[in-house]
Image: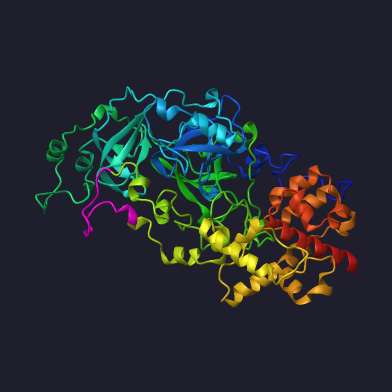
Amino acid sequence: MSNDGTQDASKPRLPWQTGKSGFSWAKYLEHCKARAAPIKLFKDPFPYSKNGFKVGMKMEGIDPEHPSYYCVLTVADVQGYRIRLHFDGYSDNYDFWVNADSMDIFPAGWCEKNNHRLHPPRGYTLTTFNWSSYLKHCRAQAAPRNLFANKTGSSICPNGFRLGMKLEAVDRKNSSLVCVATVAELMDNRILVHFDSWDDIYDYWADPMSPYIHPVGWCEEHGHTLTPPNNYSKGGSSRSFSWETYLKETKSVAAPARAFKQHPLSGFRRGMKLECVDKRVPMLIRVATVDDVGEHQIRIKFDGWPDQYSYWIDDDSADIHPMGWCQKTGHPLEPPLTPEELGETPECPTPGCHGLGHVKGAKYVSHHTAVSCPYSPQNLNKEGLIPDRILSKTDQGESKEDTISRERSKPAEGKNPVGRPPKWRRLELTEDSKAASQDPDWKLYDEDSSERRRKKRRLLSQEEQGVTTAAKPPVGVASVHPSVDTDPTCQEMRQSVMNPGYEVKPDHLSPNIWAKHSRYLNQYVQAVKNGNPNMWSVEQVAQFVWSIPDCCHVAQNFKEQQIDGEALLMMAQNDLVQYMDMKLGPAIKLYNSIVLLRQRTKQS
C-alpha cells in the first residue's frame, strides 16, 4: 500500500503487469508462450512522424459510411496517433476514428482544387459555403497542410484504370455477391467502385491489389454467379446478362486485366499477438490474438474475452497494429481481461464491460445499462442502432435528391428484382430496432429536434409554476424531461427530477422520493471500501468520481482542482455544474452520491 491508502501501482498483481504502464508485452508473451505478429505483415507498421492534429482543427474527409461523400470535419478528440472526427452540423453519434496518416482526410480547399463535390455542413448549401467565411464564423483553424499524408489527390492513376470502365466487384455489405460495377472516381492509386443501377451507399474505395475487384469475365471463368444491374432488360422483357451486349449498350469498355494486381495470401498465423481497435468501442485498442486465418482476412479474438466477441477483419486493415504500436504512439492499450473482470461490475451489468462506450456512438463516452452497452447480448450483432446520417435528413422533409449525390439510375418501381438488395430495404427497422427506438434511454439521449425541445420547455415552464425546489434546473436542460405525462412511469420520473430532495438532509424533506431516487446509486457508493470519506486523498476522490455512471470524464478535473474527501463532502450541486464543468445529468448523479457519502459518514 502507498502512503495515500491506495494499492501500490508498481507492485505486479498479474504476471504481465509492470510499473506505471501496467502491461508488459514481453512478460505477457513469455507468460502465454506466444509470439507477436511480425512487423512485415502490417501495411504501415509504425508512423514516421508525430500526430500534429489538435482538437478544433477543421478539414475535409471521406465519410466512411458513404465513401463517395466528401464532408466538412472537425477534430473532436486526439488519442496518440489517432483522431476522432466530427461531421460539422451533425450529432456526435456519427463521429469516427482514423489514424493521423489516413489517406481519407484532406486539408480545407482540397475538394475544390481536385474537382470533387464537397458536402457542406447542415444549414449550408454549395453556393453559400466557403471555407474562409466559415472559419471566421466558427472562429476555428484549418488543419495545416503539412499534417496530411494525402497531399496530392491526383486523379491521374498509372494503374490502367480509367473513369467509366467496367469490372466485376464483391459487395462488401454482402460478400456472397459479385456484381457488375463501374469505376466512378480515381484518387491516388485507388478507384471508387460503384455498382451499376444502385445507390452510392454501397460504393467503396479499392486499390489494384484489392481481392474484392475482378476483371470482366472473372465470374464465368471461376464458376461464380454474376449479379447483373437491377432490372436488366430490353424492351420490357427480362433476358440473361451478357457482358458483350452490356458494354455496347452502355458505350463503355472493360477495365484491362493488367490493371488488376494479385493480392498476396495472408502471412498471419493462428496464435500471433497484436494490437487491434475494438470496433464496438472504437476509442479503445486492445491486446488481441489471431484466432483464425482466411485468404485475405484474419479473425481477431480479444484476449480474455469470450469467443462471441471475435470477428473477421481484412489483413491490411488500418485498425490492426504490431506489438508496441500503442506505446510508441502514446495511445492507451487495454490489457487482457482477467477472469475476475468477467463478473458483473458496478459500471455495467455486462460481464467484462467497464461502462465505456455506447451503442449510440461517440456522443456518449460511458453507459451503465445493458440497453446502452455495446457488449450486451442484445446489441452484440445488431445493426442500425444509429440512424443513417444522410438518410435521416429525408425524415426532416428534405428531398431524396438532396441526400443522394450520385444516384445514377434507379430500379423500376413496384418490382423486386433478382440481384443486389435495394438500399431502402437494408435500412428498414427490424423488430429489435423498433424496440430500441422505443426504449426510454433512446428517447432521453436522442431528443435532438428543435420542435421537441420547444414542447419540453413549455412543459417545464408550466410545471415550474407549481414547484419550488433548491435544485431548480435551468431552462437549457429541459430536454431531459419526458414530453408526455399520461404514463405513470413518466410522471414518477418527472416528479423525481423536479423534486428530488437535493438537500443536505434529504430524509427530513422528502424521504420517499429520496429513497426512490438514490436506490440506483447506492450500489456504486457501497462498492467503495476506502473507509471514512472525510479522510480520502485527492487520488481516492478521483477514483470515486470515475466509478459514478457518466462521470468518468471529469475525474481528472477533480485531481487538477485538488479536491480531497473533506472538500468533496462540502460541495454543492451548483459547484459541480459551475466550477467542474459538468453537465446537469452527471452532476445530479454525482451530487446524489455525495449526499449518500455524507449519510454514510454520519452513520459511522
Please give left or right for residue 17 compared with residue 40 in the image.
right
Asked whether the viewer can see residue 474, the reply is yes
Residue at image location 70% in from the left, 53% down from the top: 551
Q: What percent of the width, then of the height, locates residue 362?
A: 56, 48
Residue at 83 percent across and 55 percent down: it is 571
Marks counted in the figure total: 0
Quarter residue 80 falls in: top right
Q: Quadrant of the C terminus?
A: bottom right
Looking at the picture, does residue 475 appear above or below residue 81? Answer: below
Q: Is residue 7 visible?
A: no
Q: Nearer the viewer, residue 65 or 508?
A: 508
- Name the main secondary structure of what is drawn in magenta: loop
Q: Is residue 422 magenta?
A: yes
- Specify whether 530 is left or right of 404: right
Q: Residue at x 29, y 34 (%)?
A: 183
Q: Position of residue 308 (x, y in %)?
A: 51, 57
Position in image of residue 175 (x %, y %): 34, 48
Magenta span of residues:
408-424
Q: Is residue 256 left or right of residue 358?
A: left
Q: Position of residue 393 (x, y in %)?
A: 42, 51
